[in-house]
Amino acid sequence: MPLEVVPRRLSHQGWLTYEQFYGLKDKAFSLSSDPSFFYPSASHGSAFNELLSGIRRRESLSVLTGDIGAGKTTLCRTVLKNLDRQTFSAFVADPFATREDLLKVVLVDFGIVSSTDLATGRLRGASRTELSYLLYEFLDTLAPLQAFAVVFIDEAQNLSLPLLEEIRILSDLDGRARQLQVVLVGQPELREKLQLPEMRQLSQRVAVRCTLLPLNCDGVDGYIAHRLHVAGGSPDRVRFSREAIDAIFAASGGLPRLINRLCDRALHHGHLRRAAVIDGATAALACAEMGAPVAAPAKEPPAPLSSEATDQWFSETDACVQRAGNDLPEETSDPAPPGWIRAAGRRERSRTVVPLTRMENLQRKWLRRLKIALLLLVALVGAQLGIAFAERMMTQPLMSPSVRNPAPPSLPKPFEVPLAPAADVAGPPANDHIPSL
């Protein structure tokens, strides 16, 4: 299905700065959602065709998701510009609206009522039921004319569950021959919200599901050239070199909004230098100014020297590694060690070196920390057990006091010799005869 390009309305000349130097008639990289600059990449062109075909087939509910800055709003406005005259459209940009506010915005965009009627007129303070009947009467008038209505709701991931249920009721008007279609537009969180159990009825009614993906490197090249061409530029007046495109792709991740910011700053610095070609240095300056990461330029490997010196150096290196027990360090100071081994004054030859990724380095670092923590835990538990054992030994002895302090054994009494009775001092004993001298 070919894309109908909307004629470009030129901006006021007073708004332009570097555009006049590069021969541009309008801001090529403005952040506004202008359908004129819509670039039908592989992802964006497919989503455009699916949404437009779903609306023309009168599908009741469609969902468009994409990351921040992926170009969802620009795509929706491009689809609205390509609708036929028999399709009325409304675009709701406020995701935090209540049920009544949602109906008011839809009625004003469809032309049923005016904003004055809702603010100060007869519909001021109208209830949800009264606003719903106005919408139903409008849809009934579209059936004889074979006309239809479609509502785009942007930032739908911020809608509350009751408001999503109200949208389901609006899109499920089987009695009115599906005169109203709803397109929910939001970030990837919208897909997660539609997977909730309470959102089963709404999810089952989704007929078209589209996802916008970031641009690849070739897509960034085509995107930049397309916007310069739409703004009135020509390759002989302004163009981006391949190095600049690679730098912008690496810094933006392929998101159109970031590409616009980086290209705008690159053209500004190119204008200051009076350069018709935006080279890699100018693009790197713009990336650094916007705080985007800049990839370091690749270095070419040095020329090889003699093979004899290289073989000798490798043999010496292998011998040193073998003597050291092949205990090579796990991490180096460089985030990605080069694949060229440098020897002072000798030949440099390519050797297979597998650099560790960031995740592998983190895994090894945390594994070492875990080992240290386990060792400290074991030491702490051992110390606690030793202290508890010492306290137990001091408070609860192993032997009872009777066993520890036994009574001394009783010794036999010494042998006693009976002594004769003492002699009478008064006189000699009887029957003693003392011989005379």
Image (spheres, grey):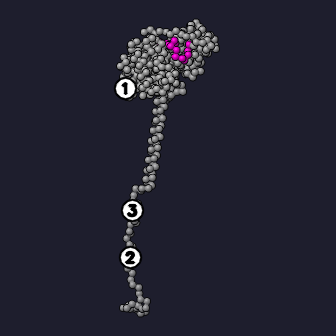
Estimate the spatial distance between the alpha carbons at disc 1 and disc 2, rounded to whole Å.
117 Å
Residue 417 percent coordinates (x, y): 38, 78
Residue bounds of the magenta highlight: 28-44
Which residue lies at the image location 38% right of the left edge and 68% below the top edge?
410
Q: Which residue is labeled 3 in the image? A: 402
The three-letter code of the residue at mark 2 reads Glu
Q: Looking at the image, is 374 positioned above or below residue 433?
A: above
Q: Looking at the image, is 206 positioned above or below residue 323?
A: above
Q: Which residue is labeled 1 in the image? A: 200
Q: Residue furthest front?
A: 122
Disc 2 residue crowd, few under 14, some 14–19, many 20+, Cα 10 Å: few
Estimate the spatial distance between the alpha carbons at disc 2 and disc 3, rounded to whole Å.
34 Å
| Residue 37 falls inside the magenta stretch | yes
The three-letter code of the residue at mark 3 reads Ser
Q: Nearer the viewer, mark 3 or mark 1?
A: 1
Q: Which residue is labeled 2 in the image? A: 416
